[in-house]
Amino acid sequence: MCSRFTLNLGDAINLSKRLGIPLAATGETVDRFNIAPATSVTAFRHQPDRGAIEAASLHWGLVPSWTHEDRSSSGPLINARSETVPDKPSFRGPWRQRQRCAIPASGFYEWEKVGRARLPWLFAMSDRQPFAFAGLWDRWQDPVDDTVIESCTVLTTTPNSLLARIHDRMPVLLDETSAPIWLDPQRAPADAAALMRPFDADRMTAVALDPYVNSTAHDDPACLTPRGETPGSQFDLGL
């Protein structure tokens, strides 16, 4: 499961430039240290109306286009198991219509259960480079007042060796080589499915963090404080 992550604005700009995608349309102007579900996230996607890859601001928690009511705040679909997206009613439409997206990130958080405690860990690239979550997006329109919600979900897969002792799932991660394949609507679903695998553990690092990050009310550099250290000694993600 992936339910929280961090994004350095510089990383978002860096990755968007590498992929040749203008970032301005998302409105991102600050670093975000504790991005949670039911908030807006930056995502790269192919926009059929424009025939190009664009950056968009999407609601994190998929609202299927066919649902009769806005479910963005009740039981949001923040994750989707990659093994079952072709068949699950909530996800098979976006999957078949190739509504794939890539959600840029600098790192993501997972929690280790130790007794009654939930101890946070940060997972990031060893070289501190940005990456993206593989996702799906959809567009829902209110049948009453025509309100439109564009939303997304993050795909998950089995964990690599780095995450396996913490959680039984991990997000599907994309780098600057695999992201263009994922975003290309001309690539068949089989090509995209081949990317839905555990990311190479040797290219990742894990840092035990202070429980300060546990609260979604906290969204500041102290979220990156290593466990046992005082705020101000944040893990260097370039943030």
Image: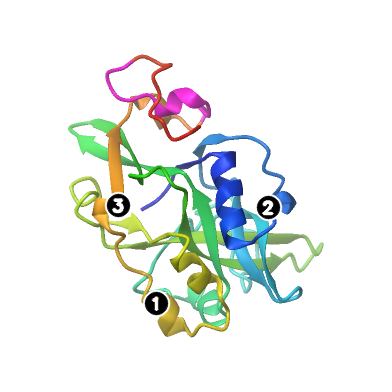
Mark 2 or 1: in front is 2
What amino acid is at disc 2?
Leu
User: What amino acid type is highlighted by mark number 1?
Assistant: Ala
Residue 103 in the image: state x and y as whole percent. 53, 56
Across and down, in percent, residue 129 comes to 44, 47
Residue 12 visible in this rendered orientation of the protein: yes
Q: Is mark 3 on a helix, strand or loop?
A: helix
Q: Looking at the magenta stretch, what is its main secondary structure? A: loop
Q: Identify the residue position indicated by label 3 in the image.
A: 203
Q: Earlier in the sequence, mark 2 or mark 1?
A: 2
Q: In this view, does 163 lie to the left or right of 32?
A: left
- The reply to whether discs 3 and 1 touch (Cβ–Cβ < 8 Å) is no
Q: Is residue 200 left or right of residue 22?
A: left
Q: Residue at x 72, y 45 (%)?
A: 27
Q: Residues within 10 Å of mark 3 (few under 14, many from 20)?
A: few
Q: Could you give the CA–CA distance between mark 2 and mark 1, rounded to whole angstroms?
A: 26 Å
Whether residue 68 is visible? no
Q: Name the residue under label 2.
A: 23
Question: Separation of disc 2 and disc 3 at Cα?
Answer: 26 Å
The circle drawn on residue 193 is 1
Question: Front-most of 122 and 184?
Answer: 184
Q: N-terminal of the two: label 3 or label 1?
A: 1
Residue 65's place in the image compared with 25, above or below, is below
Q: In this view, does 194 lie above or below 132?
A: below
Task: Tell me the magenta residue range.
Answer: 217-229
Comes first in the chain, label 2 or label 3: 2
In this view, the residue in front, 4 or 117, is 4
